[in-house]
Amino acid sequence: MENHKLKFSVDSALLRELGEKLVESVHLALVELVKNAYDADATMVEVTFSQNENGENQIVIIDDGTGMNFQDVEKYWMRIATTQKTQNDVSPIYGRPRTGAKGIGRFSCRRLGNKLNLITMGTEKGGQRGRQCIVQKTQVEFAWDNFPPGTDVTTIECPGRRETVPTADTGTTLIITMDPERENEWSTRGYGWLKRQLAVLAANRGTRRPEFEEDPGFNIYLFAPQLEEGIKDLRTEMFNAGWGTLKAFINKNNQAVCELDALGIGTKSHVSRKTFDALHDVSLELGILIDKKEHLRDKRVLSLGNLKDILGRWGGVQVRYRGFRVYPYGDDDWLNIDRDRGLRRPSPRGELFAFAQTLKGINPRRALLNMVSMRSYVGSVEIGPNASGFEMKASREGFVESPALRQLKEFTRYAIDWATIYYEFYLKSKQKKESALARAEFEEITNETVDQDSLIESAIQYIQQEVDIVTKELPPLEKKEKERALFSAAKVIKTQYQADKRELMQLRLMASTSILLLVFSHEVRSLLALLGEGTSGLQTLAEQESIENRAWIRQLSEEFEDTKERFQDLLGLTSLIGVDSRDGKPKQLTLRRRVERSIRVFELIIKRYSIKIDIVRIPDTIITTSLSEAELMVVLINPISNSIKSVIAGGSDRRIAIAAKRFDGLTKVHISDSGLGLDPENFDKVFEPFVSDPHRLLYSKFEDEIEDDIKHIVGAGSGLGLSIIKEILEARGGEVRFIEPHPNWKCTLEILAS
């Protein structure tokens, strides 16, 4: 008996077999080769479909990764199976998690074409980048037709050469001559799938991982003339595939220039009135990627599947300073977007509130209600080399607080809020179109023209009829349950619809008061002229009358003069809050003077009910700068009116105190009263529109105490005053809220304004 040692041999047919089984399509094969570039710590890869000098179609893949030296090619590339990626699950320089399938790169090449020219530049030690090391250039040619079935793959030689290049960039180039049999596999649909797979890699805009160099990001460029025109930057394609692309910069006048290109909106531009004097050479570009299929502009690049991956890994607004990323901006909520979403702050501030009013169908008080999360913004703010006022912290984590940093946040948030207002406009327009379509379909089904006001009732009635038909064969008990459920659902719909109609009617009535205000203003001016003439006449008459009548006439003249002054004050207020005040601009206003003026509005009722109003704790130096004259008067008059009503309803202890001080760069105003008080559970509720008296106690007691001839001075309460104040202050960067009062008081309202 002879003893022999046997060895496995590998038939060349295995290459084709594995290529077919492991790599199902040419598109997947190309994805795997780009993933290999990503795993090799490349910062970019170019994929070009072209023709060589022989007229053959080819695919050229070029990356600037670490490449391979000769030993790497021999040990790993030329080995059919390898454990390299299993043993090293992150890339050597940036620590990227490996993405490529384990060792199927050469099978992907085999799947794509019948020839491969591999050109790779790697350092002698391997796993390094750049010109700082000696680089080996290795070139190997693979003619897959030289691997016919029935031959041992280990016996087939592939011509190759290597050379040492003293200074050169690392990287790998794959030149694949396409197999004519495979060329018809390429299609526009498959090319779209390719883009969606690669978009997740292109979304890497830079990050850092412990114990590794900072990852600068990964760019993918595609050029496939037979499938799509032009060179495609996949990251830009990804930005443009979402709901919108937002760009903004600071112009020479220090204004924010914003441009939005969005689904259902088109291209819109806007220049802020607000200036950012501390900002120069600053711009931003953001993709607004909303994870809803109907909000995607290009589904060839983005799908809900890859979008979820992109936003989870790379969502956030980064900051780049002179070309380098600044941390932690982009990994955190540095713009307070998620905070404001959590606090349900739906009202834009400053001039954006007025802008929201110009868009038809938008409620400016709720224009930011549908703001998307910080992660839905993918892009960065660029601070260029000519910018000033930015200083890195000693820890290199963020910037030192400065006017430039504060304005950078304001500028970025301004642009995002402006785009969000348009997103709200898009949603409302889309909803309106869908409603009109649904109405048209309903009228077609019922063969009836339905009036808008009766649309809800008609739809519910139709559903009830259809349910009656469907449930006719059900057992009595089950039928009764179905009818009860339908009745409850219909009641909810009807109740909400009627509430919305009432609110709309109230808003329409309020809008009409501006016309009445103009009429009132005109009549008061006429009355003032008569009072002026009457006062002059009484003074002349007093000089002619006897001494006993003179004192009485002069007293009457003084009362005329007091009445005239009160009317002048009221006329001044109507001019502030009338139509002409729409362009009122914020300015420096002395607070105490405006408080005194607000109190004079209620002078008659204050005297009659002996209400004590203490304003000694308002220093003469306290000012506001963020409000217009009209806005400040509205902010003051309404709470004072509420306090007056509360102390009258509350009994004999009728005290109000108004105090103010500067705090943390803001003017803080406290308005306290000794009236009925407010339960903490209603501190937020009373700021909702049309909620004026949650416990239904204030106005019932107030009606019992107030005299009819002066009831009109403070009014019956519409439930809109506090909500309007809240909107004014939040639009100007301020706040209003009820706080726990001091033991000497029953209720305290806190106002914050800059």
Image (cartoon, grey):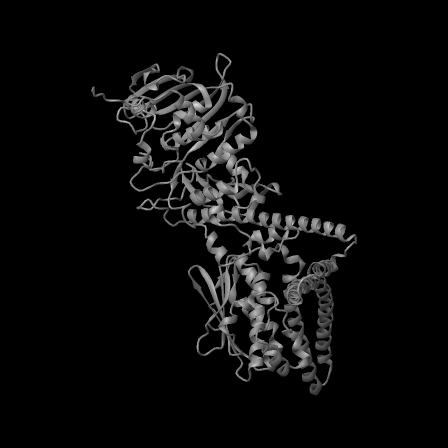
Q: Nearer the viewer, residue 528 or 516?
A: 516
Is 706 located above or below residue 641 in the figure? Answer: below
Q: Nearer the viewer, residue 94 or 714?
A: 94
Q: Nearer the viewer, residue 557 or 746?
A: 746
Q: Please indicate whether residue 343 sits to the left or right of residue 86 in the image.
A: right
Q: Quadrant of residue 458?
A: bottom right
> How many numbered discs?
0
Q: Nearer the viewer, residue 438 or 258?
A: 438
Q: Please indicate whether residue 723 sits to the left or right of residue 33 in the image.
A: right
Q: Residue at x 45, y 50 (%)?
A: 335
Q: Where residue 374 appears, x then y in whole percent?
A: 47, 48
Q: Please indicate whether residue 19 sits to the left or right of residue 243 in the image.
A: left
Q: Residue at x 55, y 85 (%)?
A: 652
Q: Where residue 429 appears, x then y in whole percent?
A: 65, 48
Is 211 located above or below residue 77 in the figure? Answer: below
Camera sees residue 312: yes
Q: Residue furthest top?
A: 54
Is 349 located above or below residue 386 in the figure? Answer: below
Is 622 located above or below residue 93 in the figure? Answer: below
Q: Residue furthest bottom?
A: 548
Q: Quadrant of residue 451?
A: bottom right
Which quadrant does the N terminus fall into? top left
Q: Where residue 703 appears, x then y in whole percent?
A: 64, 80
Camera sees residue 253: no
Q: Where residue 89 appears, x then y in whole percent?
A: 33, 37
Q: Please indicate whether residue 388 sits to the left or right of residue 493 in the image.
A: left
Q: Residue furthest right?
A: 448
